[in-house]
Image (spheres, rainbow, N blue to C red):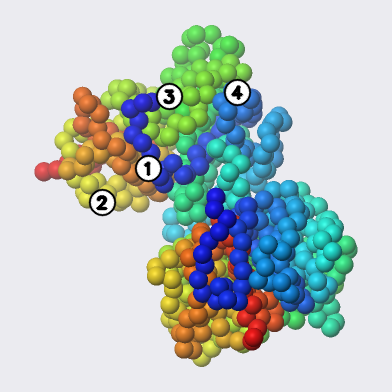
Amino acid sequence: MSDAPLPSDTQDALVPVTVLTGFLGAGKTTLLNHILTAEHGRKYAVVINEYGELGVDNDLVVDADEEVFEMNNGCICCTVRGDLIRILGGLMKRRGKFDGIIIETTGLADPAPVAQTFFADEDVRAKTRLDAVVTVVDALNILQTLKESPEAHQQIAFADVMILNKTDLVDDAQLKQVEDTLRSINAIAPIHRAQKGNVKLTDVMDRGGFDLQRVLEHMPDFLENPEHHHEEDLSSVSLTVKTPLDAGKFQMWIGALLQEKGADILRTKGILNFEGQPDRFAFQAVHMMADGNNIGPWKEGEPRESRLVFIGRNLNRPQLRRGLESCAVA
Amino acid sequence: MSETLTLRGLIEKRGASRVVEGHITSCAASRDHQRFAFTTGEGDVIIAHRSDLTDAASWNTYAVHDGPALSVAPDTDPHGFLTGGDDGRLCRLDMHGEIEELGKSRRWVEHVLSYVDGKASYIAAAMGKQVELRDATGRTVLKTFEHSSSVSGITFDAKGKRLAASHYNGASLWYTQSKSNNPRLLEWKGSHIGIAMHPQGEALVTAMQDNDLHGWRLSDGHNIRMSGYPTKVRSLSFSANGKWLATSGADVVVMWPFFGGGPMGKPPMELPGAGGALCTRVAFHPEQEVVAAGFADGTVLMIEPATERVLPVSLGGNGPISALAYSADGCMLGFGTEEGLIGLVDLAAA
C-alpha cells in the first residue's frame, strides 16, 4: 500500500460504494453482516432491497425500491436505478455519518442499471465512486443456477470480485469445475473462496477498481478458453499491445465499438499506455458508458504495455485484436 | 468549521446569516410572512422571525426529523410550518414550537405543499409512490393518489383544483374535488425529476433526468421540448404573470418565454450569471417580474429580466445554494447552502 499514489483531492472526497450482488441464497446478507461487524473502525451506510433474506444489523439502513429507468439518450441498454439516485443524494446530505456505502441488490437483479447509475448521473458521479461490484456465488448451486438464469450470468460478468461461498459443501473436483466456469465468463475478477461469508475484508472493500492493475498483471493472455462457447454465452477476451497507443485513435475506435456493440459488451476494463503520457490510463465501461482517468506513473520494471479486457457475448476476438492494434502509434 | 463568513450585498445592511450543522434542504415563509423556516440534512428546522430578522442568534432550532428533513411548506394556518422527512414523517411545527406528527409513511416524505384560499384548503405530501391529499388540519386524508413509480415533484394549480405529480414516464394531473379518482395522464418517456405549473394553467413543465425540460400545453396536450442544459435542471419557477419560466442548470439563468407563441420555437433568454458558476436554484418574486437566483459558488442575485439589472443579495457565501424562496408578500428572501449557511434578507421598503 505504501507505494500507492496519493489520491487527488477529488478522488479522496468521493465516497466509495460497494455493490453486493449474487443469486438468491448465495449468502449476500451473511457476507454483508460479516463486513459490518468486522473490526475495521469504519461506518457504512447500507442500502438493502425490501426482499432481504435476513436482518441487517447497522445504524444507517435505507430501503431501495429497484426502480429501473431508461435514459433518453438514444441508447437502448442505458438504464439507471432511479431510486439509487435519490437514495445516494439523500445520503450525501449526511456525508459525515459514514465512510462508505454498501448496496445490496436483489438476487434477480441485473447489475447493469446499478453500475450505469455511477456513470450516467452527474450528481452521483460528483460525490461517489463505484468501488467494486462484489458477486457472491453459491458453490453448491451455481452450475444449476447458470443453466436456468440469465441474471446469474450477468452478475458474474459484472463482478470486480467474486466470493465463492459455501465451499465446504462441495468437493475439490466440483470446486474446480465451478471456478473454471466462473473464469470462462469473467476472466479477470479475482475469486476468493469462503464459507459463511468469512472473507478477508481487504478482498472485498476499498478495491478502488485498481487492483485492476494487479489483476491484469497476473492474467495470462489466453486465459479465456475458447473450446466450449456458444455464441450467446458470456465470455471474456483479453488483449495486450506492446506498442504505445495513440490516445485519439483509441477514443475513436472504442467509442465506435461500444456504440455499435455496447449491448453485447457488458464490461470493458483496461490499463493503457498512451504515447507521450507518463501516467497509466485506466479505462472502464459498462455497456456503452465509458470513463477513464490517469492513475499515476508506471512502476519501476513494469512492462509498459496496454491491456484491455472485454466481457460480453458474441465477442469476436480477432476483430477486437485488430481494432486495438490499429490504435498503436504508427 | 468557522462559524462566521463575511457576506457582501443586500444581506449586509438588510439581512443576517448563520451557519448551522447540515446541508440546507429547503426553505419557506409562513403564510403571515412573519416567520421563515429552513430545513437541514440533520432533520432540524430553524425558524427566523421577521421582527428580529437581523439578529441571527435569535433564530430557534427545532429537532423535528430523524434523518434529513426533505421539504418545508407554510402551514394552512398563518403562523406554522409543515415538514416532510426521510424518516417518513409528515410534521407540523406550530408557532409555539410544538411538533405534531400528522402522518407516518414507510416511505420518505420528499415534498410537502399547502393550498389556502377562501373556499378550500389542502395539504399535500408525496410519500414514495403515493401523494396524500389532506384537509386543512392535516389530520384527515381526503384522497390518496397512487402512481406506478416514485413521485419526484408535486404542485397545485393556482386555484387548488388540480394537483400535478411528476414521475417516471410523465406526469399525472389529479382533480382535488372530483368524485372519481382518475388522473389525466401526461405521458413522455423517461425519468421526470421535478415539476412546475404555469400560474394561469396554460402548461405543465417537468425537469428530466436527461438534462432537459418537457412541457405539455394543457389545452390540447401538445408536447413542448426545452433543451440545451449542461446539467440536470433542479429548480423551476414561473413569474407571477406567467410570462417567464426561470430555470437552474446552466451557468446563466435560463428563462423560457411563455408568450408570443413561446416557448415553442423560441430561444430562451439568458440572464447574467455569477461568473461561470452553475445556477442551482431559482425563485421568481411572487408579484413583480424579478427573479432570484442562487449559484454553485454560494452567490445569490436578484435580476430584473426587462433591464437585466442585477442586485447582489449575497456574495462570498460557502457551497452551492440548495434552497431559495421568497415570502408570499415578496418582502423576505431566504436561502441556504449545502454547507449549512442560511441567510435571510428583508426587502420591504425601509
Please name the amino acid that badge 1 sits on.
Ser
Does B188 sit left or right of A260 as displayed?
right
Decide which of tag 4 and tag 1 comes sooner along the chain. Answer: 1
Residue at the image point whose x is 60% and y is 51% from the top: A93
Q: Of helix, strand and loop, which one carries label 1? A: loop
Does B186 sit left or right of A282 as displayed?
right
Does B135 sit left or right of A119 as displayed?
right
Decide which of tag 3 and tag 1 comes sooner along the chain. Answer: 1
Residue at the image point whose x is 47% and y is 63% from the top: B297
User: In this orientation, does residue A186 appear?
Assistant: yes
Marks 3/1 same chain: yes
Which label was assigned to residue A8? Answer: 1
Q: Using a 10 Å C-alpha cutoff, classify the residue at mark 3 as few (fewer than 14 neighbours), some (14 to 19) or many (20 or more).
A: some
> Which of B316/A196 is in front?
B316
Decide which of tag 1 and tag 2 comes sooner along the chain. Answer: 1
> Which of A63/A324 is in front?
A63
Residues under numbered marks 4 and 2 in contact, where contact means CB atoms less than 8 Å apart: no
> Which of B53/A206 is in front?
B53
Please name the amino acid that badge 3 sits on.
Pro
Which label was assigned to residue A38? Answer: 4
Q: Disc 4 to disc 1, how far (Cα)?
A: 28 Å
Report which residue position mark 2 lands on: A252
Q: Disc 4 to disc 3, how far (Cα)?
A: 21 Å
